[in-house]
Image (cartoon, coloured by chain):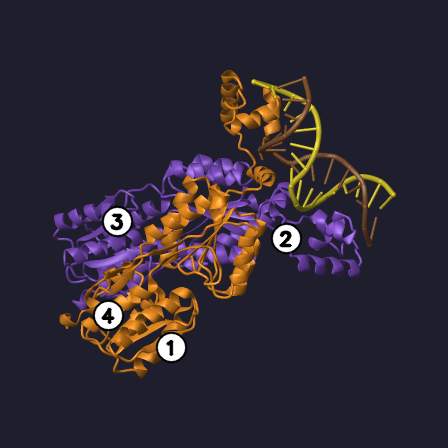
Chain colours: A orange, B purple, C yellow, D brown
Amino acid sequence: MKKKLSIVDIANALNVSKTTISFILNGRAQEKRISGDLVKKVMEYVAEVGYKANSLAKSLRTGKSNTIGLMVEDISNPFFASIARLIEDRAYKNGYKIIYCSTDNDTQKTRDLISMFRERHVDGYIIAPPEGIEEDIESLINDGMPVVLFDRHLPNVATDFIEVDNLFSTYNATRHLIDQGFRNIALVTFASQQTQMLDRVRGYQDAITSKGLKAIIKEIAFHQDEELIMNPLRDFMKGNPDLDAILFGTNHIGTCGLKVMKELDKKAPTDLAIISFDDYDVFKLHSPPITAIAQPVEEIADYVINVLLDKLNDRSASLRSRSVILRTDLKIRSSSLKSSV
Amino acid sequence: MKKKLSIVDIANALNVSKTTISFILNGRAQEKRISGDLVKKVMEYVAEVGYKANSLAKSLRTGKSNTIGLMVEDISNPFFASIARLIEDRAYKNGYKIIYCSTDNDTQKTRDLISMFRERHVDGYIIAPPEGIEEDIESLINDGMPVVLFDRHLPNVATDFIEVDNLFSTYNATRHLIDQGFRNIALVTFASQQTQMLDRVRGYQDAITSKGLKAIIKEIAFHQDEELIMNPLRDFMKGNPDLDAILFGTNHIGTCGLKVMKELDKKAPTDLAIISFDDYDVFKLHSPPITAIAQPVEEIADYVINVLLDKLNDRSASLRSRSVILRTDLKIRSSSLKSSV
DNA sequence: CTGAAAGCGCTAACAT
DNA sequence: ATGTTAGCGCTTTCAG
């Protein structure tokens, strides 16, 4: 095992002080008026022996780790996976690495994870927060950590967040179903007090009541395990034979919904019109293609990382907090069209 | 901003030496025969003030960062995303954090990324390696870093790897198509010299030639951008009207294939029988459901993390290198069944 | 322009 | 059983 060389080794080899090496390596040669010759010599030697600064030591000294902690519900969910990918690209381009973790929307787990991230001195946090995590996030902010929330926010916590216009999204989708002539429209969603979920429910309710229809809301406990979503869903569908349309509150529920429909041999939109929140290949390629509320994933990722980088570069920017609400795009496909019957 | 407290702060507060605190915090109280009373007092105080050890300092001192570097082709690809999720769970359970990155199969990018990971002193590497990265991986191994490859391996690099039986998988899938009576069977895959791809091609070829049929192989340049996959795919399908079946080499190509077929209004299996490598919701829910070669994702993740943890815990284990070849499962669905015509 | 030296927070020999 | 102390590798003030 090749011994790791340190800044001292290269200083000795070149008969220069380590300070000088440090300055050169950190691009402060100009500023410190170090001779071009020396700079060149050092750079060449460093390249030759393949010296890499120990960023642990650097972090310990400077207090910044150049690491961003990314906490999502589930990294394997296509929505979060695409966000993670985009954030990764932009972060690396700016010299930051990403440590990720999946919270499963579990408050205690998230708490532990935040604590881990703190220990590791991550410089900034990108979080899709579960319920009940307000205090932990607040303490993070009080300690001066840059935090950007996304996908949802915490009403009593003043910090930057990026999300979509959930209320209008489901309102609009529900109106679309009503306009198509559907009347027994259910919303199936996760039982949750998270802002995005509450807004999605309200949007649906607003549209339903504005037309004097009856709201039918089925809430399912959050679970990774598909069976535990499909079971109540199956019961619900069987128990409500008059339904003519369902709006699914997330891609995960939507996908499970499609699986149940397949089992029960129900076809959209004839047996049941379908719209789901989030858009991805499953919905695009389904027969019939599924109408979906597409979130602007790139835009979300861009805002998230830009806001965070802003705060990272300018601590005073941490003071004001921005909320960015982006529009979704209702991709109307045949699963929600009455005329295609 | 609350000042971060250090081990010295808590030592002073309790009038104990920091060594003692350190021992207690590291569970070496027994061994060092520190009085139960003191231990209790310290633990309580630590909990009360919420002291967290600075793991940067700890890492600098001990030389291990408790971080694993995970390098995949694309974290937003469902195959890699699910692996990432499973690896994450197991790593965190064992006290390791995950830094991830997507290589895009780009050698230079991967090289830079490895270099970044080295700088950060990650303790171990989990890599789905692109072509041409042999030397970098070798130098990692020579420097004593635990490295586990997965999804593919590097023939000239002696290290542990976990992969599936690619050759048999495509052989078996192709045989299935032949048995169903298809005769003009194409393989569409990424142009790549990676082991898994070569094996997939060979498996296909073996099956084809064993029946005296003609191999039709379409290679497409690797790309994230779907358009750049769909365009050549479209041309290929249009240019080969006698094809009666296609085996897609990856989930990404398979999905693009389905999109093109949708555009061209070709139905499986009537117009074209379809099998794809990798299995996921898109294939399961498609109409007709798509026959797929399902990789044992959990098993892969388990082996990957277990082998890595072994090496991490016992450096001597690094010497012997294991290769684990797992079986895939051909999920036969109607897209490949002649009888369903 | 360059060097000496302090110190980031922690661990672990080595005292006592 | 507990304390002293020397670094881990780096940045950065301060002195030349």
Q: Nearer the viewer, residue B221 or B272?
A: B221
Mark-to-mark CA distance, 2 and 4:
51 Å
The label on residue A232 is 1
Of labels 4 and 1, the one closer to you? 4
Please, which chain is the residue tagged with disc 3 on?
B
> SS class of the residue under badge 1?
helix
The chain under label 1 reads A
Please determine if labels 3 and 2 lie on a single subunit: yes
Residue B168 image offset from top left, x and y in percent: 34, 54
Q: Which quadrant: the C terminus of chain A?
A: bottom left
Pointer 4 local density, CA inside 10 Å: few below 14, some 14–19, many at least 20? many
Q: Which residue is mark 2?
A: B52
Alpha carbon separation for disc pair 1 and 3? 36 Å
Residues B95 and A143: in front is A143
Q: Which residue is mark 3?
A: B226
| Badge 3 or badge 2: first in the primary sequence | 2
In the figure, is residue B111 to the left or right of B26? left
Q: What residue type is disc 1 on?
A: Pro
Q: Nearer the viewer, mark 2 or mark 1?
A: 2
Task: Tell me if C4 is positioned left or right of A308 in this view.
Answer: right
The CA span between labels 4 and 1 is 26 Å
Q: Do discs 3 and 4 share a chain?
A: no
* Mark closer to the observer (3, 4): 4
Which SS class for mark 3?
A: loop
Instruction: Give the mark nearer the N terminus: 4 vs 1.
Output: 4
Confirm whether residue B320 shows in the render.
no
Alpha-carbon neighbours of circle 1 within 10 Å: few (<14), some, or many (≥20)?
some
Q: Are marks 3 and 4 in contact (CB under 8 Å)?
A: no
Position in image of residue B12 (x %, y %): 75, 49
Report which residue position mark 4 lands on.
A175
Residue drawn at the location 40% of the way across and 48% of the way down: A87
Which chain letter goes with mark 4? A
